[in-house]
Image: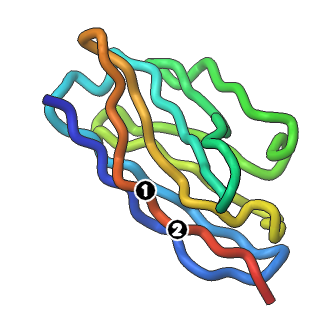
């Protein structure tokens, strides 16, 4: 049974930075692609970035390219999302996600609020 726990959210001013972390347990973390999603109020959940099992493959939605960086530490069973140059439109609950054993796993999310 997989478990994902996010941390690192908070309130930040426009232009600021945050680093989100997601620590995994209950499965062989190094074997699976990890994803970060976000959901803003009134909007659908959207995929922000993903990273392959070894960390060599990454991809991002256009709106965060050049500002966000996804990375992972397989020794620590943790995936990160470094978010720089944050904008008010980045305000959302950010979720960690993976898929294995024919089902998806989600964390509870961490709130990111970008406001002056």
Quarter of the view holding residue 7: bottom left
Location of the N terminus by quadrant is top left
Q: Position of residue 14 (x, y in %)?
A: 82, 77
Q: Position of residue 89 (x, y in %)?
A: 81, 63
Mark 2 = which residue?
Answer: 111
Question: What is the residue that sits farthest to the front in this orientation?
Answer: 42
Q: Position of residue 81 (x, y in %)?
A: 58, 50
Query: Residue drawn 32% across and 32% down?
Result: 105
Above/below status of 31 relative to 85: above
Location of the C terminus by quadrant is bottom right
- Judge from the rendering whether residue 101 lies leftward or rightward of residue 30; answer left or right: left
Question: How far, Cα to Cα, is label 2 from label 1?
Answer: 7 Å
Query: Residue drawn 70% across and 66% down?
Result: 91
Count residues near mark 2 (Cα–Cα under 10 Å), then give few for <14, some for 14-19, many for 20+. many
Mark 1 = which residue?
Answer: 109
Count residues near mark 1 (Cα–Cα under 10 Å), then give few for <14, some for 14-19, many for 20+. many
In the rendered structure, are the residues bearing label 2 and label 1 in contact, judged by CB atoms less than 8 Å apart? yes
Q: Position of residue 80 (x, y in %)?
A: 50, 48
Query: Residue drawn 61% across and 51% down?
Result: 39
């Amino acid at each position: 049974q997989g478990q994902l726990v996010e941390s690192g959210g908070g309130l930040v001013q426009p232009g600021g930075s945050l680093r989100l972390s997601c620590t995994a347990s209950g499965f062989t973390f190094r074997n699976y692609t990890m994803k970060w999603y976000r959901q803003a109020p009134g909007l659908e959940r959207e995929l922000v970035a993903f990273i392959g099992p070894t960390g060599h493959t990454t991809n991002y939605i256009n709106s965060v390219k050049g500002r966000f960086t996804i990375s992972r530490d397989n020794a620590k069973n943790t995936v990160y999302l470094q978010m720089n140059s944050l904008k008010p439109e980045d305000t959302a609950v950010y979720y960690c996600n993976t898929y294995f054993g024919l089902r998806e796993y989600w964390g509870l999310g961490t709130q990111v609020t970008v406001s002056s």
